Amino acid sequence: MNPHVYISCIKQFWTTAVVKRSGDVTRLQALVNKKRIVISEEVVREILQLNDAEGVNCLPNEEIFAGLARMGYEKPSTKLTFYKAFFSTQWKFFIHTILHSLSAKRTSWNEFSSAMASILICLSLGQRFNFSNKKRIVISEEVVREILQLNDAEGVNCLPNEEIFAGLARMGYEKPST
């Protein structure tokens, strides 16, 4: 699959985008093709069909220790850093996959925090977890097209990162360090 990114719509969005806050609700507001676009957590949840607003954010420490023990974690501890090495091969693979998919880590892939432990435990038990409360979510082209209601024929395969970061900077966000 080779998705198209509609440069003119993205440029319009980032050129006009502002962060609006009312109460505890934060949203992005912009104008694209003379149409007002509002993106909030609720809109993202609805379009992605996350249905996780009532899910677990983070388990209490006692539940984390008990949940990891049920998963076969072999190193009882009171510390809130956990290690893949103390799980069976199957769990190591599962943990590795989840860490690489959901974590913002760049090093120390053999250890994980209590927040990641909560995710692993909820997934292993089939419990609903509030993933959208985490900082990293990958949004597909289809979702962006639906939110922006794109009908722009001008498409390219790539938008330079600098343009994306410039748009974020205008809104007050810092470029991530590499």
Image (tube, rainbow, N blue to C red):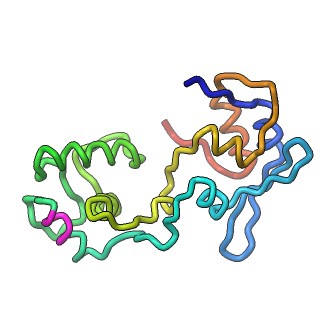
Residue at (68, 65) in percent of width and height = 26
Left or right position of 71 against 111: left
| Count of marks overlaid on the render | 0
Question: Dividing the image into 4 quarters, which one contains the N terminus?
Answer: top right
Vertical comparison of 177 with 3: above or below: below
As rendered, which of 37 and 23 lies closer to the eye?
37
Vertical comparison of 63 with 94: above or below: below
Residue 106 position in % (x across, y down): 37, 40
Name the residue furthest left: 74
Left or right position of 164 against 177: right
Residue at (78, 39) in percent of width and height = 150
Residue 94 position in % (x across, y down): 25, 47
Majority secondary structure of magenta residues: helix
Q: Is residue 21 magenta?
A: no
**Quarter of the figure with residue 63:** bottom left
**Quarter of the figure with residue 113:** bottom left
Question: Magenta segment, which residues?
Answer: 65-70
Left or right position of 56 against 77: right
Residue 99 position in % (x across, y down): 33, 47
As rendered, which of 79 and 36 lies closer to the eye?
36
Residue at (35, 62) in percent of width and height = 115
**Quarter of the figure with residue 107:** top left
